[in-house]
Image: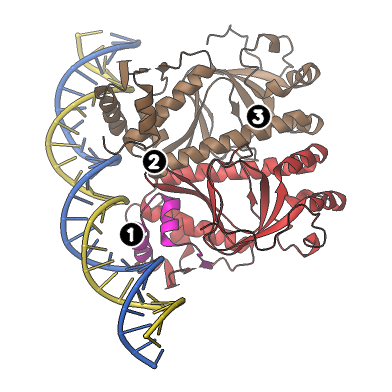
Chain colours: A brown, B red, C yellow, D blue
DNA sequence: CGGTTCATTGATTCGCGTCAATGCAGGTGG
DNA sequence: CCACCTGCATTGACGCGAATCAATGAACCG
């Protein structure tokens, strides 16, 4: 998951600085739908940017000037209520697209969980490109459809699942994501804090922690350290995540 | 429980049966992006179908053969857990598009709340048309983006809002929807049961009912009958929905 | 080393769920 | 026309799962 260091680029065409050939997430990102010529066009409007953990990329309501592919690192998207209650609507990992839903203003805040590198496009120019490259628009529609599916799963989780079921679902999703990026599917690295997990699952840190302990006691997972989880009993964990178990 | 279309149109071009000129939701539906010639093309692949209240249009996991515009009536989309817990992910009203996210199988069940009329297209042929009509694809992307925005709002609601706040949010959304269709924005008709509202808001019917009573007591709404709500104090209701109020 | 942040665990509270009863239409058949 | 359902909304009594409040421990760091 390591990426070679980059010079700080700003607005210059990033031809030399951003060789797509070296991009480790090209097959996952929206770029995967493009042929060589189209990729060349996209490349000319792309720049890179890097953020440290905790950095705020944008606030809810900010004007959207750019959209991005995540090249490395992890981001969190969240919404806030006036009194500070927070709901994290998603985590973005390498290959994910940042910028949906596309509107004049972003409906959520974005913050870096780990050191994160983005491949950025001007939103305006991307829209222009979409007009000329149907495959790009199609790909974006596919991504939006995927996101919509995840969002609906998350609604079921937040509206109807117990704390235990929520955590089980989260861990399985994380494992699936990790697998897409060369992970084993058994061992999961969780770069985000318990508070982040709680705000994603609609719980508190205490409840998340207790649920971890509970899953561990039941031999469904192992917890070598707080940010590393090993799935010890996948069928059991899946059954809980799916809501197939009566009691705990 | 399952009801078939009343007007059994199958494959015939529905020129006579579905005169778009008479369509009252054309300006709201995906059709709004099309010029006359394009509308003509879409019309040739459209048929209509009608469903009685309670009719199941499709089950979660069914193969997708068609997508639709809602012409009249109300639909609910929902997901189920094995033990019967249900999460309604959305209600569709006239002008809404049924079929997102577009995949090989629908990730939710669809049921008619009231008598409902659909303008239906073969999914396969719509995808073909999308290839030829960029505006159609663009419009669908817009719709998907809109849906994504709503989904994220709903995640905040389900994960972090109190029962009272959830109901206030729901009523304001319903009022906004009604206004798009010529309603006053003050009086809301709720065709769905308390159980449906509960399953949409991640609550129980009892809690929904108690929250109604509470809002009524606080003079924020009036409730002439269970399916009719009048907003009596919009600023107050908005403040609650936004989570700006300390206590109840 | 003190200071800070974060995860875990325990004790207690509370909002909402569960269980139960009542009321109120609307439909049906005698 | 009325007796009797049946389904839905409302209300009350009570219990539980997760939140809140609080303390401890572990890792990191200047």
Query: How far, Cα to Cα, is label 1 from label 2?
Result: 25 Å
User: Residue B35 vs residue A9: left or right?
Assistant: right
| Residue matched to label 2 | A85
Label 3 packing within 10 angstroms: few (<14), some (14-19), many (20+): some
Is residue B209 rendered magenta in the image?
Answer: yes
Q: Mark 3 or mark 2, which has the lower sequence index?
A: 3
Q: Are marks 1 and 2 in contact (CB under 8 Å)?
A: no
User: Would residue A225 be seen by someone viewing this image from the given angle?
Assistant: no
What x and y, as percent, mark residue A80?
Answer: 45, 40
Instruction: Please give the chain letter of the residue carrying mark 3.
Output: A
Label 1 packing within 10 angstroms: few (<14), some (14-19), many (20+): few
| Residue matched to label 3 | A66
User: Would residue A177 be seen by someone viewing this image from the given angle?
Assistant: yes
Q: Residue at x 60, y 67 (%)?
A: B183
Choose mark 1 or mark 2, whichever is in front: 1
Quadrant of res A201: top left
Start-end of magenta stretch: B188-216
| Residue matched to label 1 | B206
The correct choice, above or below, for A37 with respect to B121 in the image is above
Query: Are labels 1 and 3 assigned to the same chain?
Result: no
Q: Nearer the viewer, residue A109 or A233?
A: A233
Instruction: Please give the chain letter of the residue carrying mark 1.
Output: B
Question: Mark 3 falls on what kind of element?
Answer: strand
Q: Nearer the viewer, residue B38 or B78?
A: B78
User: Residue B33 vs residue A148: left or right?
Assistant: right
Identity of the residue furthest to the right in this view: B37
Query: How far, Cα to Cα, is label 3 from label 2?
Result: 27 Å
């Amino acid at each position: 998951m390591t990426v070679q260091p980059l010079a700080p680029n700003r607005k210059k065409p990033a031809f030399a600085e951003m060789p797509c050939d070296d991009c480790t997430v090209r097959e996952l990102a929206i770029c995967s739908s493009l042929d060589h010529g189209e990729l060349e066009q996209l490349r000319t409007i792309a720049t890179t940017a890097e953020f440290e953990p905790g950095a705020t990329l944008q606030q809810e309501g900010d004007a959207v000037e750019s959209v991005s592919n995540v090249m490395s690192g992890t981001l969190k998207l969240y919404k806030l209520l006036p009194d500070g209650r927070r709901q994290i609507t998603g985590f973005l990992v390498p290959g994910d697209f940042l910028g949906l839903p596309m509107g004049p203003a972003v409906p959520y805040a974005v913050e870096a969980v780990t050191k994160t590198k983005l491949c950025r496009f001007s939103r305006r120019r991307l829209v222009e490109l979409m007009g000329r490259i149907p495959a790009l628009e199609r790909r974006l529609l596919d991504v939006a459809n995927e996101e919509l599916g995840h969002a609906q799963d998350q609604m079921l989780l937040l509206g109807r699942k117990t704390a235990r079921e929520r955590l089980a679902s989260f861990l399985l999703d994380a494992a699936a994501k990790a697998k897409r990026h060369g992970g084993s599917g058994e061992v999961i690295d969780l770069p985000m804090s318990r508070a982040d997990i709680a705000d994603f699952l609609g719980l508190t840190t205490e409840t998340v922690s207790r649920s971890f302990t509970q899953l561990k006691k039941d031999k469904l997972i192992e917890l070598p350290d707080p940010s590393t989880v090993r799935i010890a009993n996948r069928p059991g964990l899946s059954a809980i995540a799916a809501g197939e178990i009566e009691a705990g």
